[in-house]
Image (cartoon, grey):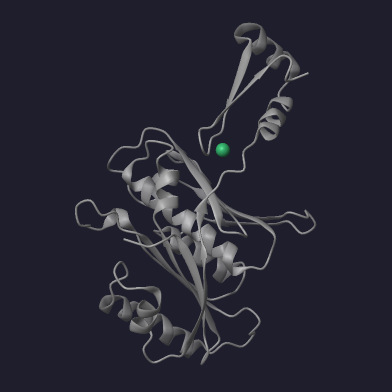
Amino acid sequence: MSQKDSLQKFIFTDCNVRGQLLRMNKSIGVILAQRDYPEILRKFLSELLAASAMLSASIKFDGKVTLQIQGDGPVSLMLAQCDNRQRLRGLAKWQDLPDSQQSLQELFGAADLLISIATNKKVSNYQAVVKLTGTSISDAIEEYFNTSEQLPTKIIFASPFMQHSEPGIQNDLVGIFLQVIPTETNYEKESWLSIINELEQGLERTDLQKENNLVVLHNIFPEHELRAFDEQPIAFYCQCSVERSKNTLKTMPKSEVDSLLAKHKIITVTCDFCNKKYEFDAEDLK
Ligand SMILES: [Zn+2]
């Protein structure tokens, strides 16, 4: 059980690899409490949220990263959004989810993973779409980096929902992100593969929940020299506002808005991310 939701970047000083160690608990709790999510969606959504924080921390920018999975399965949408200050929000929409449907493919069907980066200056927005492949959220994100960005990347998640925790103690979601440093065009495949191997073996001899970040990193990579940067806090934050909600109504046909006003006198717009309600009457919408 952690101290605080945070992300800590590190680099290996003896090879061209960088990393992040992330811990989330409270921020995920707040987001998952917005809807009555089935257990399996709690796991996938929390991992997508963690991945959005990792992506946001892996680039230098002023804006937000959105990861979106859209498919033809019972889960029609899953979205996670994180800004450059590690403030995030997310949601999933689903219908009729039988207990037997547990795999990524069963839940999402034929689906795409959309990655978009919107900068606050709106000069260099970026979008990429990859087919949703693999069996986990980490597989899908790794595939994006490996194919679209040609950056060998490894992500592991220890999800609280799939582990036995002591009664009353909610485990953290712990994530580790490793990536070849993008400026290095020539990376040594052998040393990358050996680090992945060390990660997989090292995880077996360290307690991600109980040990602090530096101990975890030392336990996993005892042979390497690492430099860890300051921890960055991660928190839930929703950017919804009166103005944005009003703008949503303004994009609807006027006749539709008028008939809603005639019927109800007040139109309520509920934010999909945080359930906050915004009310408008005819005067507000003039
Ligand atoms: Zn909101």
Q: Is residue 94 left or right of residue 163?
A: right
Q: Residue at x 78, y 55 (%)?
A: 121
Residue 80 visible, this orientation = no
Q: Quadrant of ligand 1?
A: top right
Q: Residue at x 53, y 35 (%)?
A: 272
* Residue lying at the far top of the rendered structure: 262
Q: Is residue 269 left or right of residue 23?
A: right
Relative to 85, residue 275 above or below: above
Residue 41 at x, y percent in the picture: 38, 46
> Which part of the image, by quadrant, shows the C terminus?
top right
Relative to 247, residue 190 above or below: below
Residue 151 at x, y percent in the picture: 58, 75
Q: Residue at x 66, y 81 (%)?
A: 183
> Total of numbered circles in the picture?
0
* Residue lying at the far front of the rendered structure: 3
Residue 242 visible, this orientation = yes
Residue 255 at x, y percent in the picture: 73, 13
> Which part of the image, by quadrant, shows the N terminus?
bottom left
Q: Find residue 251 and report its image quarter.
A: top right
Camera-side residue of 30 and 177: 30
Residue 19 at x, y percent in the picture: 50, 76
Relative to 89, residue 95 above or below: above
Q: Residue at x 53, y 47 (%)?
A: 89
* Residue lying at the far left of the rendered structure: 167
Q: Is residue 170 left or right of residue 137?
A: left
